[in-house]
Image (cartoon, rainbow, N blue to C red):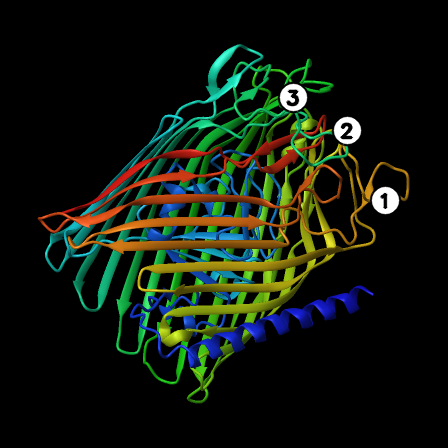
Amino acid sequence: MKQTRLSSRLLACASVSLLALSAATATSAHAQDTAISQTVDVITVTTTRREENIQDVPNSVTAGSGEDFAPYLEAGGDILQLAGRVPSLYAESSNGRVAPRFYIRGLGNTDFDLAASQPVSVIMDGVVQENVILKSFPLFDVAQVEVSRGPQGTLFGRNTTAGIISIDTVRPSEERGGYASVTIGNLDTVNVEAAYGGALVEDLLSARLSILSQNRGDWIDNAFSGQDDALGGFNENAARLQLFYTPNDQFDALLNLHTRDLEGTSAVFRANILDTGSNQLNGNYDRETVYFDSAFNNPQEYESHGAGLTVNWYQDAFTVTSITGYETTSGFSLGDIDGGNLSGPGFIPFPSETQDGIDELDQFTQEIRLASNSGGATEWQIGGYFFDSSFDITTVGPNGGFPPSTTVRHENTLWSLFAQAEHQATDRLQIAGGVRFTSDEKDLTTLVSVVPHNPVNVSDEQISWDLSAFYDLESGASVYGRVARGFRGPSIQGRDIAFFGAPSVADSETSISYEAGFKSEPWNGRARVNGAVFYYEVSDLQLSAIGGSGNLVQLVNADKGVGYGVELDAEAWLSDNLFVTMGASWNETELQDDALEVAPCGSGQCTPLDPDVDGDGFVEVDGNPFPQAPDLIFSVTARYAMPDDKGGEWFVYTDWFWQGDTNLFLYESEEFNHSGNFEGGIRVGYAGVTDTGRNYELAGFIRNITDEENLVGGIDFNNNTGFVNEPRVWGLSLRTDLR
């Protein structure tokens, strides 16, 4: 029965995509009489580790410029603002502005531990940001963000079974200049961003310095302690210095130095904001008030520093590229986990407050790649990669009570070899394939613990690969097919040691993904419409069973996980003054393991919907959707500009996203799920040019314009705790060129 439903839905997916392609082609054929002169920009992506037009890449990819994502960030937004803005991409966090959890096509990891392994890899300026803290480095002076969906294990290594998020910042150039922007808003929001660069030595050395300061005042009252404006704010400062050395046409080197300092509030947990039997926020919820019995009010502090060196040697037939990266971070987050006090709101059987922190994470990476540049029918790449990481995690009760101080050390060493080739078989057909061998080893050592534990070691060696075909149609559109195998190495979870439990281990997971899609630029290039259908299976799917009466975190493997769906990216000039974009995805996911059982809510206050066949307190999750995997995501933006006779323009810009059914945990319950979450924003302003030729922009903005109160996540172990999205923020922003 399941296979029949699956086949029917896949057929429906294919039909939708073919209809979209037909409509795009028809639009192009019947739109010759329009007077629109604007055309969509060429988007260059590096998902194949080469610079290619996004329309020529046999993969489902969305790319946006820093300008595209700037409206989401100007009110103090962080990398989580990407959630819902890209088809099949979702993100959330129970750790405030650090440790984001990403999901692509429903595949991700809900584990909140600081050593959690994720199947979505974040790569910044060519260097993988493996640890969850590194993944949260703030976005500023960004050139482009690319989201490549599906396994990317051949060219980007392990832990990419779901896909990658690649972030490229603006590089130095010979041209002197930059920009500065200032935002002032409610909630004492003040953000400053600036960048400036140019040639230090003409034709030899150029530099670019970028800075960011994001600030918000505390705005949430703690009614239990009587403190007004006790939490909710943050001060985030970051900087990046880049030096670009170009002594001749055969060699260049880019040095990237970056740093970050964060002080603020971790996630704000709210007790019993869901009634038993309902997933709607109840009368216990007050966005501006909590009832914490802790004097600390959920503080969070982190410092991060890093360096990257990218070197290219250009020869007639090939280019040698070396990318060296070093990252380090330290800090902590504290949470009032029960979200209240013994008097409420609602029934809270016992208090719970925990602090987790990383001490001196050190990550070193080295990649060497040899790539052909002959321009012939066949192009190839070969290379090697090395990764080494070590860090300590300390879990402690902040008052010296429970849990007792526990420190564990995580170490990870990995190396891999890879090769990729593309061949232009005919004028219209290109075929490509690649393979990667990876050896991955991890160790866990208990340094401080009430209960001693032996060291844990896991390792595995696997091969990832991909094959694709790309075909140009006579209409100017193109179609492609891709099959890929992904690999995520074994994982170790040690947080339960702090709660007198044993560490847990998950075996390696592997995936096989099938994808077919089309790419088109109809309407004489005034629009871009790309779409894909996909199906994937993950064997030995790594999952984190979180919760139960002890709020423990145990790694488990499911026999299989299945996902399938449709994605659509579109943008168009509807007139010379109106530009719109649209992204949509439908993802269905399913756990397939008739023996997998997990503990439901430990509080007894939620309503599990899964059967407890054995009567042992554990429920079966076979057939459930993946956790935090929205079945639908829809986003739209529109910008209308009204030019004036001074060379400037008045503009109105708006953006919206909508999220469908989303289950929060492995088990299903009446309470811990949501559907219909949405947010919107608006900007109204003027962009002009001064008498000296300097560009500037002055705008008023509102983020979360309708002040939606969306349930984002929950904690189920001693009450129906939840946490929600950011409030409405409004203000003014000014941006100007620097020369």
| Dot 1 amino acid type | Pro
**Front position among marks 2 and 3:** 2
Name the residue that disc number 3 marks. 352
Q: Quadrant of residue 52?
A: bottom left
Relative vertical location of residue 665 with respect to residue 482 in this rendering, above or below: above
| Dot 3 amino acid type | Ser
**Tag 3–tag 1 contact (CB < 8 Å):** no
Q: Quadrant of residue 443?
A: top right
**How far is mark 1 from mark 2, CA to CA?**
17 Å
Task: List the single residue furthest toward the right.
Answer: 614
Q: Residues within 10 Å of mark 3 (few under 14, many from 20)?
A: some
Q: Is residue 527 left or right of residue 212?
A: right
Lower sequence index among marks 1 and 2: 2
Specify whether residue 290 is in view. Answer: yes
Lower sequence index among marks 2 and 3: 3
Lower sequence index among marks 3 and 1: 3
- Residue at coordinates 61% horizontally, 37% vertically from top-left? 711
**Front position among marks 3 and 1:** 1
User: On residue 605, which mark appears?
Assistant: 2
Of the pair 302 and 658, the residue shown nearer to us? 658
Q: Residues within 10 Å of mark 2 (few under 14, many from 20)?
A: some
Is disc 1 placed on a helix, strand or loop?
A: loop
Is disc 2 placed on a helix, strand or loop?
A: loop
On the image, the x and y values in percent for residue 23 come to 51, 75
Name the residue that disc number 1 marks. 611
